[in-house]
């Protein structure tokens, strides 16, 4: 089955640091990947759609200069939280579908804590 | 962003009981999915529904795609301890590479 892997699973860093999170499709190619953010006791909210070889599409209210997305290959998308601040602390999760008619599968998420 | 209305928000049941939860939307979706999330992990796909009126089972889980395409239901029969977690519905305009809109979640707790 389709497996999506995220790395790292947990990050703690100081305010002002930039943090990169990787999302990989392990056994399939994904032209599109999605990045979600989930605050405690809340649902998943889509941040952006990552498109291989082109610019990401950001949801309304998400700062594209703060959350940089790069989808340089068919198996890897990265999310970089630039100059992170405590309010950026959250659970970041990516997803991808194996094909146009397949459901999305999720990575195990990255817990980001900014001190 | 938009969220789907999911109810109940939480459930406290005894092992062996059946569970029902539902998800409603003000707009139409062409695909409905149900996921389960354990603490500190990503959501895991339970059931995917692609056709209005469709009824699909996965073991003790049964989900239905509402005929109006604005709602979906998930039932769990004979609950067991590992059913504990948060259940999310998600709607999608189309398949695969379209973004998901998630429900608010139903937290299932099993009382010993």
Image (cartoon, rainbow, N blue to C red):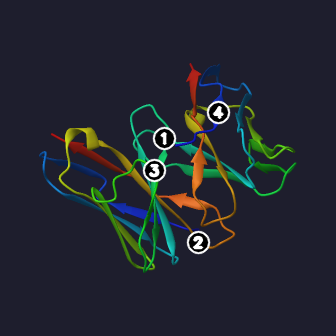
Q: Position of residue A76 (x, y in %)?
A: 39, 73
Looking at the image, residue A78 lies above or below residue B108: below
What x and y, as percent, mark residue B71?
Answer: 76, 40
Q: CA distance from mark 1 to mark 4?
A: 20 Å
- Residue that label 4 marks: B5
Can you identify the residue that label 1 sits on? B38
Residue A108 shows up from this direction: no
Q: CA distance from mark 1 to mark 3?
A: 28 Å
Is label 2 on the same chain as label 3?
yes
CB under 8 Å between discs 2 and 1: no
Q: Nearer the viewer, residue A8 or B92?
A: B92
Q: Which mark is in front, 1 or 4?
A: 4
- In the rendered view of the protein, which quadrant contains the C terminus of chain A? top left
Dots 1, 3 in contact, CB < 8 A: no
The numbered mark 4 sits on a residue in which chain?
B
How far is the residue under mark 4 from the one under mark 3? 20 Å
Give SS at disc 1: loop
**SS at mark 4 in the image:** strand
What residue is shown with label 3? A60
Camera-near label (2 vs 1) is 2
Q: Report which residue position mark 2 lands on.
A: A98
Question: Marks 4 and 1: in contact by CB < 8 Å?
Answer: no
- Given residues A76 and B11, the one toward you in this image is A76
């Amino acid at each position: 089955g389709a497996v999506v892997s995220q790395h790292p699973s947990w990050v703690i860093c100081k305010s002002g640091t930039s943090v990169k999170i990787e999302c990989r499709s392990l056994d399939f190619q994904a032209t599109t990947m999605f990045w979600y953010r989930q605050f405690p006791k809340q649902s998943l909210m889509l941040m952006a759609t990552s498109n291989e070889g082109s610019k990401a599409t950001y949801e309304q209210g998400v700062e594209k200069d703060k959350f940089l997305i790069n989808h340089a290959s068919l198996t890897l998308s990265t999310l970089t939280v630039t100059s992170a601040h405590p309010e950026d602390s959250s659970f970041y999760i990516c997803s991808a579908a194996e094909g146009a008619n397949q459901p999305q599968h999720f990575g195990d998420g990255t817990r980001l804590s900014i001190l | 962003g938009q969220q789907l209305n999911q109810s109940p928000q939480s459930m406290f049941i005894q092992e062996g009981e059946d569970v029902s939860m539902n998800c409603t939307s003000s707009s139409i979706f062409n695909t409905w999915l149900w996921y389960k999330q354990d603490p500190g992990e990503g959501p895991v796909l339970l059931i995917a529904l692609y056709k209005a009126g469709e009824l699909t089972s996965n073991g003790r889980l049964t989900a239905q795609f509402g005929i109006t395409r604005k709602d979906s239901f998930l039932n769990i029969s004979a609950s067991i301890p590992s059913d504990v977690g948060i259940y999310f519905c998600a709607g999608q305009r189309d398949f695969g590479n379209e973004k998901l809109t998630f429900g608010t979640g139903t937290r299932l707790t099993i009382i010993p």
